[in-house]
């Protein structure tokens, strides 16, 4: 299985109450309107992911396994890739429950959104010193 990891940090404005998306951003700042954002100051965006992994994500029917690690907690979810994804955005990664696609979209038809993230994980992500990892792999 091909994998890549994104390291990011929490922020005091993390809310995680969006019902259709999960986002991680390279931006260092987060307003309270960013209700799908898990974290900021990410070391990668869509365009920075491993080239081989991106090719696999951009295949119709590919199944993407995502693992979120925050301290000693782990949340796992699955989504789908598509040949219509471009993975070109240089700022963000968005994982969607829907099939909407734009350059920020990493994957579609996810089985979780930010509102589905356990609240103990969200509480940890409200601390700017919390370091988190999102591992992305193809099954």
Image (cartoon, rainbow, N blue to C red):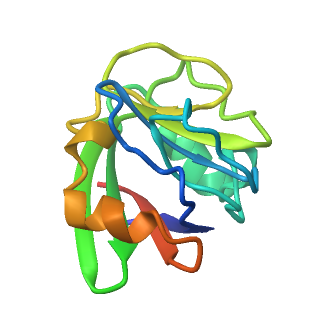
Query: Looking at the picture, how far across and down is residue 61, in whole percent?
Result: 32, 29
Residue 122 versus residue 88 in the image, above or below: below
Residue 31, relative to residue 134: is it above or below?
Answer: above
- Specify the quadrant of the image occupied by residue 109: top left
Residue at (53, 50) in percent of width and height? 13
Answer with left or right where residue 36 lies relative to residue 85: left
At horizontal 35% and vertical 37% (from top left) the residue drawn is 62
Q: Position of residue 114 (x, y in %)?
A: 33, 41
Is residue 71 left or right of 120 when viewed as pictured?
Answer: right
Residue at point 74%, 44% (across, down)? 47
Residue furthest to the top in view is: 100
Q: Which quarter of the rendered picture does the N terminus lie within?
A: bottom left
Q: Which image quarter is the C terminus in?
A: bottom left
Q: Is residue 28 left or right of residue 107?
A: right
On screen, residue 42 versus residue 59, left or right, reads right
Residue 46 vs residue 36, the one in the foreground: 36
* Front residue of this view, candidates 31 and 78: 31
The residue at the far bottom in this view is: 72
In the rendered image, the vertical position of residue 62 relative to residue 30, given as above or below: above
Q: Residue at x 34, y 17 (%)?
A: 98
Please give the count of numbered marks on the rendered protein: 0
């Amino acid at each position: 299985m091909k994998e890549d990891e994104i390291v990011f940090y929490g922020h005091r404005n993390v809310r995680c109450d969006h019902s259709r998306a999960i986002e991680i951003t390279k931006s260092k700042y987060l307003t309270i309107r960013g209700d799908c954002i898990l974290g900021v100051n990410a070391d990668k965006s869509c365009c920075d992911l491993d080239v081989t992994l991106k090719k696999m994500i951009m295949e119709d029917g590919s199944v993407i396994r995502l693992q979120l690690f925050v301290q000693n907690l782990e949340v796992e979810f699955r989504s789908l890739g598509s040949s219509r994804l471009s993975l070109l955005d240089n700022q963000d990664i968005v994982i969607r429950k829907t099939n909407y696609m734009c350059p920020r979209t990493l994957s579609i038809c996810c089985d979780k959104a930010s509102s589905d993230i356990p609240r103990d994980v969200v509480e940890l992500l409200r601390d700017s010193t919390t370091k988190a990892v999102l591992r992305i792999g193809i099954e």
